[in-house]
Image (tube, grey):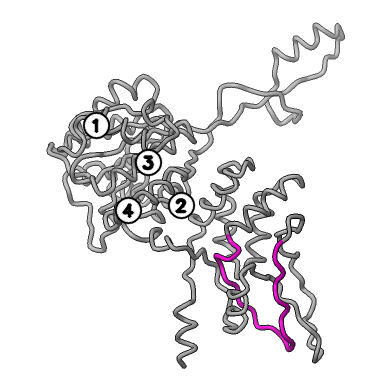
Amino acid sequence: MGENNRAGADRPPRVEAAALSAAFVTAIRRAGLSTSPDRAARLAEALHLIPPTDLEQLYWTCRVVLVSAREQLPVFDAVFAAVFRGKAATARPLSTGRPAEPRPPTPGASSRPAAPDTRPVDTVPGRQQEPRVASPDRDSASEATRTGGEAVLAMVSPDEHLHETSFAELSADEIADVRRLAAALQLATPLRLSRRTRTSAHSTASLDVRATVRAARRSGTDAPLLLYARRRKQRRKLVLLCDVSGSMEPYSRVFVSLLQGAVTGAGAEAFVFATRLTRLTRQLALRDPDQALAGAAASAPDWASGTRIAECLRRFVDEHGRRGLARGAVVVVFSDGWAHEDPEQVAAQMVRLRRLAHRIVWVNPRKAAPQYQPLVGGMAAALPYCDAFVSGHSYTALAEMAAAIRGDGPTAAAVQRRARGKEPAHAN
């Protein structure tokens, strides 16, 4: 009984597919392997549809989604071994015989597991059975063999609790660790058709009259070759507006680090606001997160002061949004909605922003509270014009925010707008 309790206590928790995908793809990119945000989204979807039960299944799922060329395998195998081996335990009931001890890795040895084997297990007495996945840690492997429990996908680390803990409950050292994780988070906006075109070999595309005429003039024939073209696809612009007032102080430092990673990684535009609006794209373009945060704090004299959401939204629309920055863009607002203004003014500015933006995502860390309801004046006025309403209070919750930016999943706020009959029209 005590042994069962001990095994249950050591049982690692499950990890959300989106958080695991974002963390592993970030490690892959840092190792020099080019991986698009679309592949990270597909990996998260694959892990959600078919959750792996051991490292073997996880390895082949990640490999099928992320690896597109044979020369990428060494880098992928090395990163997979560094991230998961020794950090996730897989237990499998073994047949009779003593399992072989794992050999120490050699420089030329491959770190990837063997392909899944569907053949029946050999149960001849006295024959030695090899475990399907061997951990480099001998103690971990022997402990997993003794427990014999069902395998559980997990990423166990000293900072595992940081993923679920609210930013407001973390210490200064833990905030520094979460800031590094947030800065590495990959944010991707939906695709849209560009005005530019490229040549296409399919006749289903539009006929490129100019290219066809130019080709006919060069060839001098009466029956020229018809050339076709289709419009290119490109990512929508990403605009981030972060509330740095006093009520958002427990979360603003992490959110600003997230802004810094989005500026350097996704080319986003970053603004902070409290009683005034400050553009920080240039200051946050620095690679050093500490220097970027210091420059941001120095450029925003109203940091940790009051909140004027309507006035700051008005300045953004007048000075930046109408000039093209918000047209067809995904706009993300980080704020708890507490403002010293008439809610009707907030609603009026949200209407103007709604007409320009393709999608508005509101991130409110107060939403994580069990009894929370958006009854505060500013939040209640802005919610009907948002496409998604998420908490973003922890690192795991940031994965929900990233999905909302991509446009994945249901939009509760949009459903609420339609139910109230307040669906605002926009032309994007």
Q: Give the residue drawn at x 25%, y 33%.
A: 273
Point out the tag, 2 or 4, that comes first from the N-terminus: 4
- Classify mark 3: helix, strand or loop: helix
Asked if the residue at tag 4 contacts the one at tag 1, i.e. Cβ–Cβ closer than 8 Å, the answer is: no
Q: Vertical placement of 104 versus 4: above or below?
A: above
Label 1 residue SS = helix
> Magenta stretch: dominant SS?
loop
Q: Which of 291/164 is in front?
A: 291
Residue under circle 2?
A: 409
Q: Nearer the viewer, mark 4 or mark 3?
A: 3
Q: Quick check: 285 above or below 151?
A: above
**Mark closest to the chain's N terminus, 4 or 3:** 3
Estimate the x, y position of residue 367 in percent, counting from the top left: 28, 55
What segment is highlighted magenta in the picture?
A: 84-105
CA–CA distance in space, label 4 to label 3? 14 Å
Residue drawn at the location 62% of the way across and 81% of the way down: 145
How far apart are the two marked residues, 1 and 4, measured between alpha carbons?
Answer: 25 Å
Residue 92 percent location from the top left of the image: 64, 79
Is residue 105 toward the left or the right of residue 180 in the image?
A: right
Measured Cα–Cα span from mark 2 to mark 1: 26 Å
The residue singled out by tag 3 in the image is: 257
**Sequence-earlier tag: 3 or 1:** 3
Which residue type does callout 4 highlight? His
Residue 349 numbered mark, or none: 1
Find numbered disc 4 in the image and state the secondary structure of the residue it sits on. Answer: loop
For the residue marked with disc 3, what is the amino acid? Ser
**Spatial CA span between label 2 and label 4:** 19 Å
Is disc 4 in contact with disc 3, using a CB cutoff of under 8 Å? no
- Membership of 126 in magenta stretch: no
- Mark found first going from the N terminus, 2 or 3: 3
